[in-house]
Structure formats: structure tokens, C-alpha cells
Image (spheres, rainbow, N blue to C red):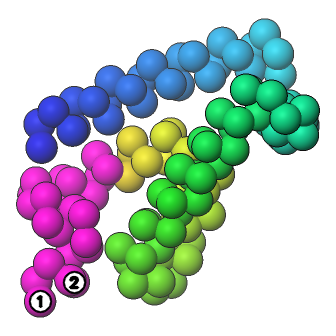
């Protein structure tokens, strides 16, 4: 659990700094670039499609982990659009909440207690 938390914390810092630099240099208009690369049917688009699959999987997992409760439905779009920025924070908070219990972290507190 320590390695997972360390990765999430370090990656969060790196990602925030990198994103800040990209926004400062190119603006925050990611959507046309992201989907434009996909429409071009080249390797950058293939990477974006693959990445979008990870975003969708992450969002589905977060919603499922919360048993699609109200909080699950609130967190699902945050996971989808927040990417690793969201997921790093989520894993840090959720792992602290379950006191490092990996089973509870992966499947949710309610399912782990059952």
C-alpha cells in the first residue's frame, strides 16, 4: 500500500506541474485536439482511444465501487473527465479511509465487510 500511495502522491505532483506548463503554453482547449487526433486515424489518435478506454474503465470502477449510490454517480463523471488527476486523489483518500485494506480499497467498504 505504501508504494501505491507514494506513486499516487508523486504522480499527482508531476501531473499538476506538467499540466500547468502545457496550459500556460498552449491553453486549456484539449477537446478538439484529443478528438481531432482520433479523427486523423494515426498513432496519436490510437493512443487517445486507448486512453479513453482507461478513463471509461476508471469511471465504471469508481461508480461500481460505490454501488452506484448518489456519491457513486457524482464521482463517476469526475473519474471520467478528471483522469489521473482525479484517480490519484481518489486512491490517496480512499486508501486512508480503509486504513490500507487493499480488499476494501478495490471492491469498496460495503462489499469488503460482507
Q: Is residue 28 magenta?
A: no
> How would you rate the neighbour count of disc 2 (Cα within 10 Å): few for under 14, some for 14-19, many for 20 or more?
few
Range of residues picked out in magenta: 91-114
- Give SS at disc 1: loop
- Vertical comparison of 4 with 66: above or below: above
- Figure quadrant of residue 40: top right
Q: Residue at x 42, y 30 (%)?
A: 12
Tag shown at residue 114: 1
What residue is shown at x 57% (from left), y 16% (from top)? 18
Judge whether 109 appears above or below 54 on screen: below
Mark 2 highlights which residue?
A: 110
Q: Is residue 29 visible?
A: no
- Quadrant location of the C terminus? bottom left
**Residue at position x 82%, y 16% from top?**
26
Q: Position of residue 108 (x, y in %)?
A: 25, 73
In this figure, what is the number of numbered marks?
2
Amino acid at each position: 500500500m505504501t508504494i501505491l500511495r507514494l506513486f499516487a502522491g508523486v504522480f499527482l505532483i508531476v501531473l499538476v506541474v506538467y499540466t500547468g506548463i502545457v496550459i500556460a503554453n498552449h491553453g486549456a482547449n484539449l477537446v478538439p485536439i484529443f478528438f481531432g487526433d482520433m479523427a486523423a486515424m494515426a498513432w496519436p489518435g490510437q493512443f487517445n482511444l486507448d486512453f479513453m478506454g482507461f478513463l471509461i474503465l476508471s469511471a465504471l470502477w469508481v461508480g461500481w465501487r460505490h454501488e452506484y449510490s448518489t456519491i457513486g454517480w457524482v464521482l463517476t463523471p469526475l473519474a471520467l473527465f478528471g483522469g489521473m488527476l482525479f484517480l490519484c486523489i481518489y486512491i490517496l483518500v480512499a486508501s486512508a479511509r480503509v486504513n490500507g485494506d487493499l480488499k476494501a480499497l478495490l471492491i469498496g467498504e460495503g462489499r469488503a465487510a460482507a
